[in-house]
Image: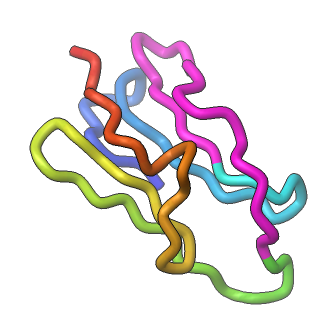
Amino acid sequence: MVWRYRDANNYYLATANALDKNVALYKVENGRQLALAPGVKHDILSNGWSILKVSVRGNRFQVYLDHRRFAGLGQHVRYCR
């Protein structure tokens, strides 16, 4: 899921990977992908649907998978400008 998209080289990205069984958070700045939170282990069904959600308020965000906030990703992280 992408948010705070400015252009193809500047945005935030949350991923849920069923093969690696993790959720991760990245910032892409000037075309370089920076890991804000490496993969948080979580069982993700490879043969079913999941809900990936990002809640944004002002300059803070939280990441959820199937309505569960992730401790490693759920902390408020300030946007870098």
Displayed quadrant of residue 25: top right
- In percent of width and height, residue 48 lies at 76, 88
Q: Total marks drawn?
A: 0
Q: Which residue is drawn at 34% across and 33% down?
A: 77
Please identify the dominant SS of the magenta region.
strand
The front one of 50 and 37 is 37
Q: Does the magenta stretch include residue 25?
A: yes
Q: What stretch is highlighted in magenta?
A: 24-44
> Looking at this view, is 32 or 44 the one in front?
44
Relative horizontal placement of residue 27, taking residue 35 as reference (left or right): left
Q: Residue furthest left?
A: 58
60 in relation to 10, above or below: below
Residue 26: percent from the left, percent from the top?
53, 32
42 to 40, vertically: above or below: below
Residue at image position (48%, 64%) is 69
* Quarter of the figure with the C terminus: top left
Q: In which quarter of the image is residue 8?
A: top left
Q: Is residue 2 left or right of residue 14?
A: left
Q: Is 73 on the left or on the right of 53, as rendered? A: right
Residue lying furthest bottom? 48
Query: Residue at image x 30%, y 47%?
Result: 61
- Seen as rendered, the residue at the extreme right is 19
Residue 45: in magenta span: no
As drawn, 8 above or below 33: below
Q: Position of residue 4 (x, y in %)?
A: 26, 40
75 vs 5, nearest the viewer:
75
Image location (x, y in percent) of residue 44: 77, 72
